[in-house]
Structures are given as C-alpha cells and as structure tokens.
Image: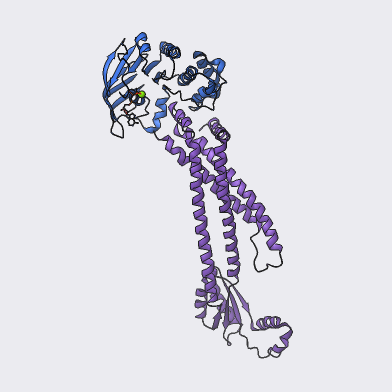
C-alpha cells in the first residue's frame, strides 16, 4: 500500500528532516508514528500525500510512484487519501453538511450521489443531527469528526492524520480514536502521527518511532516509549 | 468540461462575490474608479483627435495650370494626379468657375470684377485632397514637377505646424491612456489578490481532497470576469449620461461653431465596449495571477 525506499528530505533552508527512511505499510494496517518534537513526523506524513517532495529516494502509494509523478497527477493520488489535521481545516462559512459535500463536489461527483453519501458518513461520525450547523457552533471534538467525515467521504483506501487529537481533551481524544479504529476495522489503512502516549499504549498497534529524521523503532504491537 | 461542472463554476463564482461582500465591493470600486478616469480621458482623447481631424481635412492643395493649358491638358494633368496612390480626390475648377467663386466672395463689390470675363486672368485650377492629410506637402512637391503646372499652394509652413501639433496631442493622449490602463490593472490585481489571500484555506482544502488546478481556477475566473464587468458598468452609465448632456449643450450651442463633439452614437458604444473589455480582461487577469501563487505545490 505505502512503501518508502531510502527517503531523504532536505528543506530549502538546509534542514535535514528525514535521513534515509525505508518503510512498508500494508493495506488495512493501523500505524502510529511517534517521536520527539522536530523528529520529522509531519515531514513523513507530508511526503505521503505529496505535500512535500522527497529530496532523494522513492515513495510508492496505491500503485503510484509519488516521488516521480507529474504535477497534474497529484489530484488523482490525493483522491485515494483522506487527510486529517490537528487544526481541523474546516471552512468557517460552510455548514457541516456543506463542508463534507465540498470534498465530493470538487472531484466532480454526480450531484445525486452526494447527499446520500454525505449523510452516510455524517451518520458514521454521529453528527447527522448537526448537519446544518456552522463549524464555530461545534465543540473541538465535533469539528474533528466533521474533518474526519470529509476525509472519509470519497472512500479513500488510506487515512493519514497528523496529531488529530492534539487540540482535544483526553475524553474527546478517545472518542476520535475510537472512530479511527472503527474506520480501520472497515478495511481502511490508517497512518497517524501522535503525541498521545496513553492512547498509543492502550491501543497496542504498530508503532514507528522517528528520531532525528531516522526510524529508530518499528514494532507491531508497540508502545509510545517516551516520557513527554 | 461537463456542462454541470461549468454551471457549478459560474454559480460558485457568483456566490463568492456575495460571500466576500466587502472585498468584492473594494475590487469593484477599484475597477470603477480607474475605468471612470480612463473613460474620461478616452472620450477626451477621441474628441481632440476628432477636432484635429476636422481641421486637418480642411487642408487642400490648389494646383494652378499654366495659361496655355486647355481642357484636354487639364484632364490629362487631373488623371496624372489621380494616379498618385496618396491622392484622395481631384476637383477641376475652370477659370470661369474660379471667377464665379471669386465674385461670390466679393459679394457687393463684385462690380470691380466686371469686364474680366473677356480676358480672364485666372488660371484653371485643380483642387487636390490627400488621403492622409499629413502627406499633403509631399504630394504638392510631386505635383509641382508635372508639366503644365504653373504653381501649387497649400499654406506651406502653417500646415506643417498644424500637423506637428495634432501629432503631439495624439501621442500624449495614447501615452496617457496606456499608462492609466496599466495603473488600473495593477490596482485591481492587488485588490483581487487580497480577496484570494483571504481564501487560501479554501484553496488548500480543495487541493487536499484532490481538486484539479483548473477546477480551482474556474470560479476565480468567473469571479474576476464578473467583478471586472460590473466595475465597468458603473463608469459606462456615468460617462454615457454625462456625455449625452455635454453633446447636447455643446453641439446645439450657437456660440461654439468652429468645432463639434463626436456624436453619442457610435462613440458611447465604442467607449462602452472598450471599458467592458478592459474591465473583464483585468478582472480575469488579476484573479488568475493571484490564484496562481496558491496553486503551486
Ligand atoms: N517547511 C519547512 N522548512 C524548513 N524546515 C522545516 C519545514 N518543515 C519542517 N522543518 C524542519 O524539519 C524538521 C522536522 O520537522 P517536522 O515538522 O517533520 O517535525 P515533527 O516531528 O512533526 O515535530 P512536532 O512533533 O513538533 O510536530 C524540524 O527541524 C523542522 O524545523
Ligand atoms: Mg508535526
């Protein structure tokens, strides 16, 4: 599903964010990416949805060599990935329903397919009853559920998340994490960078630890392993 | 592109105008104000050009044939001059007609000219008009070299000064209008850039979920087109109204007879077309260059 071969990332200012990362993530896996601040987790995530290009090395994702693809193919790759962020990235002027439908509209889904599908995913994240509300009328956890619904609505094979619980309190974080687990149980691959020690330790999923731009640990039923 | 998608882009572009109400207002005002100034200068320049043309058209060459020239020779010379591609019209005025015209001009004192009929001292004359008035001098020079041409007269000196003046007025007008058009473009592009800056998040999300660059661009294209066109409509209404009033005042006023303003039709249509085109062009151009910055991966 996702494979990296000796991937390096040097930013324009000379920072070496990743130094020779090789990894293989199979279809249907649930992977936590952990590590101290500045280790290169976000960079690792960004390379996967082609927000950044590797300086060196190859990245394969769902049949594409995304280190080689042309600019105009990026949208095609993005359609097979759902992305979730710490800051939700919802459009404040659109309702919950519109925020989710937006993701279907912009890839030119036939209109009559949009409504049933949006209502489906809103059902999945338990927000059907708030479909007409604006993001600022929702709690942080609810906003993240909308973002998750948007990431899921086009049926991507992979969900990538960069600290999705970073802005949420422990209870709400658990709620979101359960949703990710449910999505993963339905067959979607999940890759999540996180600082949430408690969750990583109790879920016991695959853990990839990055330090100083290198993978220092990769365990199938891993633990968080840091005391931050 | 599917029709449904095109419809979506147009709807979305129009909706965005409303959603970004204040920014739209700022952009449309910027377009309106600059196009209004541009329009005023355009109308001014076109009219100055028109007046210059009217004056220039009055320039003609009088070709005096020698006394020996008879009707056949006069026709020959006329044909020769007409063969010159720079020449527009040649009119023959016989010495008799010349005398008649002179008498008319003398009016009451025409008696002074009596008796001249039998021994008419006037030469046969050809009146030549150039296709391009500024070619007058060079035509006169060529005609002067022809056989049976005694002399030519076209107000040498004065005519050259007139042409230098009208050329200067035209050049200054063109420079002014081009300069103004560029100022308008940058002003508008900047305003539109601000409206797009405010929407970078929207673009970012569209890209995240896999929208193509053109899908993202189209609503901005429509928006720029609409802003530019709406921005042009306001000065068009003001200018057309104002000019209608002005033409009415000037062209019917008896005190100003030595020139007339260009008529409403077609001037108002021409100016409207120019302003709409410029407005639409800078609207589209402004939003396209601004959105481009956010499309880079
Ligand atoms: N756009 C950029 N330009 C230059 N340097 C960058 C850029 N993005 C990240 N870096 C640098 O690359 C390194 C890795 O950053 P990254 O964001 O991947 O870390 P992280 O593991 O996600 O950290 P955190 O846990 O704080 O989110 C850091 O030293 C960071 O300063
Ligand atoms: Mg990070």
Query: Which quadrant of the figure shows ligand 1?
Result: top left
The image quadrant of residue A206 is top left
Quadrant, the N terminus of chain A: top left
Chain shaded blue: A
Q: Residue furthest front?
A: A228
Q: Position of residue B139 (x, y in %)?
A: 51, 74
- Identify the residue at image location x=62%, y=86%: B122
**Near-viewer residue (B148 or B12):** B12
The image quadrant of residue B72 is bottom right
Side of B45 where B253 appears, left or right: right
Total numbered labels:
0
Q: Position of residue A9 (x, y in %)?
A: 29, 29
Chain shaded purple: B
Quadrant, the C terminus of chain A: top left
The image quadrant of residue B98 is bottom right
- Identify the residue at image location x=58%, y=34%: B18
């Amino acid at each position: 599903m996702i494979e990296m071969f000796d991937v390096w990332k040097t930013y324009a200012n000379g920072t070496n964010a990743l130094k020779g990362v090789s990894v293989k993530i199979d279809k249907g896996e649930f992977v936590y990416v952990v590590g101290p601040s500045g280790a290169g987790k976000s960079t690792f995530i960004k390379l996967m949805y082609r927000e950044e290009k590797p300086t060196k090395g190859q990245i394969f994702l769902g049949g594409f060599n995304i280190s080689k693809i042309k600019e105009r193919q990026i949208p095609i790759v993005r359609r097979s990935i759902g992305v979730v962020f710490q800051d939700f990235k919802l459009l404040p002027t659109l309702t919950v329903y519109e925020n989710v439908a937006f993701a279907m509209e912009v890839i030119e889904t036939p209109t009559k397919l949009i409504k049933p599908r949006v209502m489906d995913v809103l059902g999945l994240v338990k927000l059907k009853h708030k479909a007409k509300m604006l993001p600022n009328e929702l709690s942080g956890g609810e906003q993240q559920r909308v973002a998750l619904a948007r990431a899921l609505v086009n049926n991507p094979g992979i969900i990538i998340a960069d600290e999705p619980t970073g802005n949420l309190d422990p209870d709400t974080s658990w709620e979101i994490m359960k949703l990710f687990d449910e999505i993963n149980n339905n067959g979607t691959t999940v890759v999540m960078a996180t600082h949430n020690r408690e969750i990583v330790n109790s879920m016991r999923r695959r853990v990839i630890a990055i330090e100083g731009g290198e993978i220092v640990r990769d365990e199938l039923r891993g633990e968080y392993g840091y005391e931050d | 592109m599917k029709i449904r998608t095109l419809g979506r882009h147009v709807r979305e572009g129009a909706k965005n105008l409303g959603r970004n109400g204040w920014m739209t207002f700022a952009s449309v005002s910027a377009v309106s104000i600059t196009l209004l100034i541009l329009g005023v200068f355009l109308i001014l320049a076109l009219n100055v050009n028109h007046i210059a043309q009217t004056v220039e058209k009055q320039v003609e060459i009088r070709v005096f044939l020698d006394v020996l020239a008879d009707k056949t020779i006069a026709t020959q010379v006329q044909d020769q001059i007409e063969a010159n591609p720079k020449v527009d019209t040649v009119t023959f005025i016989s010495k008799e007609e010349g005398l008649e015209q002179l008498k008319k001009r003398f009016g009451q004192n025409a008696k002074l000219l009596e008796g001249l009929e039998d021994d008419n001292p006037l030469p046969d004359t050809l009146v030549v008009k150039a296709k391009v008035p500024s070619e007058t001098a060079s035509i006169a020079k060529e005609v002067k070299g022809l056989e049976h041409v005694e002399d030519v007269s076209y107000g040498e000196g004065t005519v050259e000064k007139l042409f230098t003046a009208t050329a200067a007025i035209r050049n200054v007008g063109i420079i002014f209008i081009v300069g103004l058009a560029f100022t308008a473009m940058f002003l508008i592009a900047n305003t539109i850039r601000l409206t797009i800056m405010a929407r970078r998040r929207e673009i970012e999300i569209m890209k995240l979920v896999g929208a193509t660059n053109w899908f993202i661009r189209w609503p901005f294209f429509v928006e720029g087109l609409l802003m530019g066109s709406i921005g042009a409509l306001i000065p068009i209404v003001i200018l057309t109204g104002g000019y209608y009033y002005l033409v009415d005042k000037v062209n019917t006023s008896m005190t100003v007879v030595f020139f007339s303003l260009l008529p409403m039709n077609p001037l108002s249509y021409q100016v409207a077309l120019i302003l709409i085109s410029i407005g639409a062009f800078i609207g589209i151009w402004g939003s396209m260059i601004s959105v481009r910055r956010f499309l880079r991966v």
